[in-house]
Amino acid sequence: MNNLNQRLVVRLGFIGLVPFVLLTFACWLVHPEWLGYFIKAQLAYGIVILSFLGGLHWGVTIMADGKDVEEARRALIWGVIPTLIAWCSLINMGVGFLVQVVGFIAAYKIDKRLYESYSIPSWFIDLRLQLTRVVVTAQIFTFIAANVRN
């Protein structure tokens, strides 16, 4: 990947954090009557991004030519698991944030192992760690706001 594309990936990754950060701040700053809307928006955005992370595995696996069939099968199966975790976060808003935190951490740990096997550049794995840290922090602070401010 050329430097232009790497810079673009990094920029877009950090731009993708904007809703997480803004919604977290909003949960602490808005009038309590509006709090529920921002909590739901944060939960929904987490669902979208967690599902996106699973979908990345489909693209990587399909593009990886000549990989072990069993390894490819595991990667494709894992590709749907983050979406299922995200869906489970809808069961209850309070528990939903905790489910997403576990999902984002698990996704990073499994992604790191799978991406290394597909020779994904280390800068991307490092980026995923940085993004995951911000997302998990945002989800935790939103969970706290939801419980403290309600």
Image (cartoon, rainbow, N blue to C red):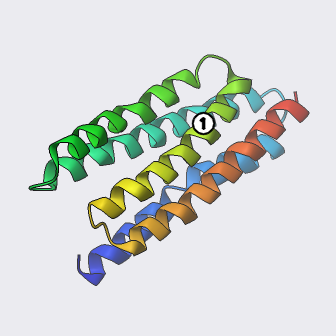
Say which of 128 and 10 sits in front.
128
Give the left or right position of residue 59, taking residue 43 as reference: left
Residue 123 appearing in the image: yes
The structure residue drawn at horizontal position 17% and vertical position 49%, both measured from the top left corner, is 68
Residue 149 appearing in the image: no
The quarter of the rendered structure image containing the N terminus is bottom left
Mark 1 element type? helix
Q: Of all residues shown, which one is farthest toward the left?
A: 66
Corner quadrant of residue 81? top left
Q: Which residue is mark 1?
A: 100
Give the left or right position of residue 125, taking residue 6 as reference: right
Q: Of all residues shown, which one is farthest toward the right?
A: 148
Give, as a three-letter code, the residue at label 1: Gln
Give the left or right position of residue 60, taking residue 84 as reference: left
From the top left corner, tell me how far across and down residue 130 is, in percent. 56, 65
Q: Of all residues shown, which one is farthest toward the bottom?
A: 3
Instruction: Judge whether 83 appears above or below 88 on screen.
Output: below
From the top left corner, tell me how far across and down residue 76 is, in percent. 27, 38
Instruction: Judge whether 86 appears above or below 126 on screen.
Output: above
From the top left corner, tell me how far across and down residue 131 is, in percent. 54, 60
From the top left corner, tell me how far across and down residue 28 is, in percent. 82, 44
Say which of 112 and 25 sits in front.
112
The structure residue drawn at horizontal position 67% and vertical position 29%, both measured from the top left corner, is 37
Instruction: Judge whether 133 appears above or below 58 on screen.
Output: below
Corner quadrant of residue 33? top right
The structure residue drawn at horizontal position 35% and vertical position 63%, both measured from the top left corner, is 116
The structure residue drawn at horizontal position 74% and vertical position 44%, both measured from the top left corner, is 140
Say few, some or many: other residues with alpha carbon within 10 Å of mark 1 (under 14 / 14 to 19 / 20 or more): many
Give the left or right position of residue 34, taking residue 126 as reference: right
The quarter of the rendered structure image containing the C terminus is top right
